[in-house]
Image: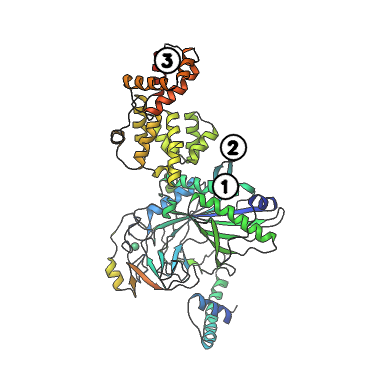
Amino acid sequence: MSTTHDTMPFDQALASFEPVLGLEVHVELGTNSKMFCGCSTVFGASPNTQVCPVCLGLPGSMPVVNAMAIESTIRIGLALNCTIASWCRFARKNYFYPDMPKDYQISQYDEPLCSNGYLDVTVPTDDGPTVVRVEIERVHMEEDTGKLLHAGGATGRIHGADHSLVDYNRAGIPLVEIVTKTIEGTGALAPAVAKAYVAELRDLMRALDVSDVRMEEGSMRCDVNLSLNRPGDGWGTRSETKNVNSLRSVERAVHSEIERQAALLTSGGRVVQETRHFHEDTGRSTSGRSKEQAEDYRYFPEPDLVPVAPSDAWIEELRATLPELPSAKRDRLKGEWGINDFELQTIVNAGALDLVEATIAAGVDSAAARKWWTGELQRTANDRGVELADLGVTPQQVREVEALIASGALNDKLARQVFEGLVAQEGTVAQIVSSRGLAVVSDDGALLAAIDDALAAQPDVADKIRDGKVQAAGAIVGAVMKATRGQADAAKVRALLLERLGVSE
Amino acid sequence: MTISRADVAHLGRLARLELTDDELDHYSTQLDVILQAVARISEVAADDIPPTSHPVPMENVFRPDVVVPGVDRDEVFAAAPAHEDDRFRVPRILDEE
Ligand SMILES: [Zn+2]
């Protein structure tokens, strides 16, 4: 296990070295059944309840390819501007590890279904968004592995465990691996490019409706390959960081690996070609298996499965099913909402694009929809460490709250309390308004009483207003809002106040 | 074209087979004969004849994406060497994570 210190500050590292990136993203397809058998793929089932002779690798069982998995993979390839192979085979990747009961994984080797594509990603920079084209090497199909639990040790990790426990529910779920070509010339933007790429892929998978792409549940996982070289030199030795399971971690993994390798190389050390494990808690990686002896998986064509040869007609039929892709959608919405690149980026970064769109579609004005999702609701999601879409507030509820604001029943401050109640699952908008007693005080008598109290408490201010210094009214309005705990309409208080004092604007 | 004892020892390790010195000699010789026979075929086969991976010329055999009930867990565990907490129990895995 290597130490986690010995790093060089990022800016200093970038002054001497150029990073070369490669990203491998695994996406679990959202098919109903597994890749080669009819077992269910539902997440979170009791261990080993979604297994059969095929995915348990029992002798005599025969795999059959799930047509939907092939269609999803071809659609992914088309969306990534790839060439679709007219003929390709599955291959056996042989290794002994109990995560696969067959002692091999069915994958694709030198004949991927899709190859040579690209994805344009928008990367936020200090000078505004810039577009970087990430080239795709290949998109291939394989089956996911089972889940291991290392038992008996103190740490739950492999070191010190006496034995392991295996759940094969995940074994055989269709997995698509998307591999980039090397990404060069990004310099200090490398961490942001990596994050933007994975985010764009995630949005693309969602738009294609081929996966639920929940990184926290492992249905989308990223491995980061990174090497450094001095300008003008050839590529350095790369490390492969696994376990990178959130967008923020993708960025942090690239950042910390640049800092680590730069320190090593500057101090006369060398980068070892190895697998490293990323730790969410520290944002750093530790050394895993050394890859200095190239792994020998003895790939050979899978004899139990016949080749896949999609016809041009089938490919074109699938191309016709491609939805509006996320980049096109962003451009369209930017125009429709009349916003600039920065405003768009704020919405995209908040993961609010679809939510804002749905909110506007529900009848809310564009500015208000954007204000709630990228303001109050995003802050709440950040505080709770959840995705905006998982906060528990729907576009429909935003519409209900906005309708109450428009009718004068709520103001923004009270609306925030309604959202707080929705996040806390206190019930519907109407129930929360009622149970929390949230309503704008519109009773003129109550407001006038509060205004009189405030004027009595600040007679000097009252005099100023009477003398025509209308801007002084703010202090009294503020006092009334405070006295009514925000449950008043400030504009109305101001109007009543001026009327009370016989002053006009 | 020959296969060395070291190659056979490496293949043995990959296949988790513990081979004695005598066995290494024995299998090196045997595998060598097999490889020579295959090499003869390569001499005859022209570049336009790809290696056969599937003897039957079939393509695109698919199944619809339909869930079919699997096997009962108790039945599966009855055939497994060991299980614990609804999971298969396997020996400790050494340094292969
Ligand atoms: Zn199965």
Say whether disc 2 or disc 3 marks the residue closer to the N-terminus.
2
> Identity of the amino acid at label 3?
Leu
The residue marked by circle 2 belongs to what chain?
A: A
Q: Indicate which label's residue lies in the foreground, 1 or 3.
A: 3
Q: Circle 1: is it few (<14), some (14-19), or many (20+) Cα within 10 Å? A: many
Residue displayed at 44% across by 11% down: A503
Residue A77 in view (yes/no): yes
* Apparent side of residue B54 relative to residue A266 in the rendered image (left or right): left
Q: How is the image coloured?
A: rainbow
Q: Where is residue A312 in the image (x, y as percent from the top left)?
A: 46, 48
Q: Circle 2: is it few (<14), some (14-19), or many (20+) Cα within 10 Å? A: few
Query: Cα distance, mark 1 to mark 3?
Result: 56 Å
The residue marked by circle 3 belongs to what chain?
A: A
Q: In which quarter of the image is ligand 1?
A: bottom left
Residue A395 in view (yes/no): no
Task: Residue under label 3, please give it.
Answer: A498
> Identity of the amino acid at label 1?
Val
At mark 2, the secondary structure is loop
Residue displayed at 51% across by 78% down: B12
Task: Residue under label 2, please give it.
Answer: A128
Task: Residue under label 1, please give it.
Answer: A193
